[in-house]
Image (spheres, helix red, strand yellow):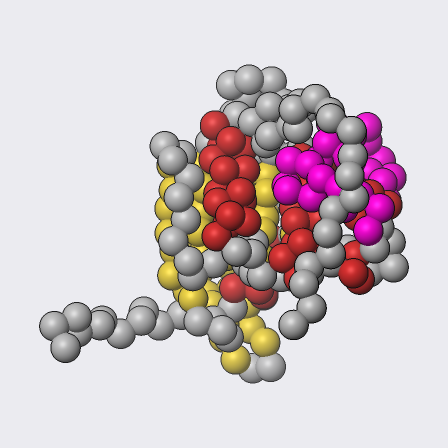
Amino acid sequence: MASDPQPHSSPAAAPAPTAGAAARPWPTGEPAVFEAVELTCVRRDRVLFEGFSFRLEAGELLQIEGANGSGKTSLLRILVLLALADEGEVRWNGTSTEENRADYLSSLTYIGHTPGVKADLTAFENLRVATALAGAAAACDPDDALEAVGLAGFEDTYVRELSAGQTRRVALARLLLQPTRLWILDEPFTALDRSGKRLVEGMLEDHCAAGGMALITTHQPVDVGDAAKTRIHMGAEPAPVDEAG
């Protein structure tokens, strides 16, 4: 079995940033509200969900659960404006995202089930491209962001040479590089080991503590400390397990 590529040695540097320590483009205490209002999604004559609503405020995390085919990814595509709902609307700070699209998208970072990084670029180059596409100054240096997600020494490694878990970490580094108020993450623990899962949980906890908000899809338990967390199950509820055997 091929082992993960080993990091290159690098000189000692200042402590890497955390989600809580990264610069925030919003004033402390500024309210924010993210809502889905009576959303309905139909695909190929099949109703995936209807009348789906939630309200997410600053400092809160919403966990969406559900079996494959329950509509989780379709919901996220609607929330990030990559698809249209058949009914209902998405609101950012009380206004439809179709009306304040630019403001909403500038407040959002979306990382899908596929990490969305380029295999033929290095980890560092991927973050430089992400910064350029964002059109805003980075909150920290790409090297520091990579160190914060456990990739110190891999800055010049091509993504195609990284493991699936390391590739996921490159994508997650964007959250530190371009801090936004709202994070929407589709299965963020995919391909990560225990330490990687705990890293993401720590980033989510720090983000919520700083007044951010996050919506994630995962079937795994999520520990975000004292952050307010809500779970919504999509589709049929799972059958109860008879633990008595």
Give the magenta-colored segment's residue range.
Answer: 128-157
In terms of depth relative to the viewer, which is nearer, 119 or 97?
A: 119
Residue 85 visible in this rendered orientation of the protein = no
Residue 232 drawn at (x, y percent): 39, 56
Which residue is at 54% across, 49% downward? 196
**Horizontal side of residue 115 vs 70, given as left or right:** right
User: Quadrant location of the C terminus?
Assistant: bottom left
Residue 75 drawn at (x, y percent): 55, 61
Which residue is at 40% across, 70% downward? 235
Q: In which quarter of the image is residue 239?
A: bottom left
Q: Is residue 91 above or below residue 244?
A: above
Residue 73 drawn at (x, y percent): 57, 64
Question: Residue extending furthest bottom?
Answer: 45
Q: In which quarter of the image is residue 109?
A: top right
Question: Residue extending furthest left?
Answer: 244
Q: Magenta stretch containing residue 129, yes or no?
A: yes
Which residue is at 80% across, 62% downward? 160
Which residue is at 79% across, 57% downward? 159
User: Quadrant location of the N terminus?
Assistant: bottom right
Q: In this view, does 24 lie above or below 212?
A: above
**Horizontal side of residue 231 vs 20, given as left or right:** left
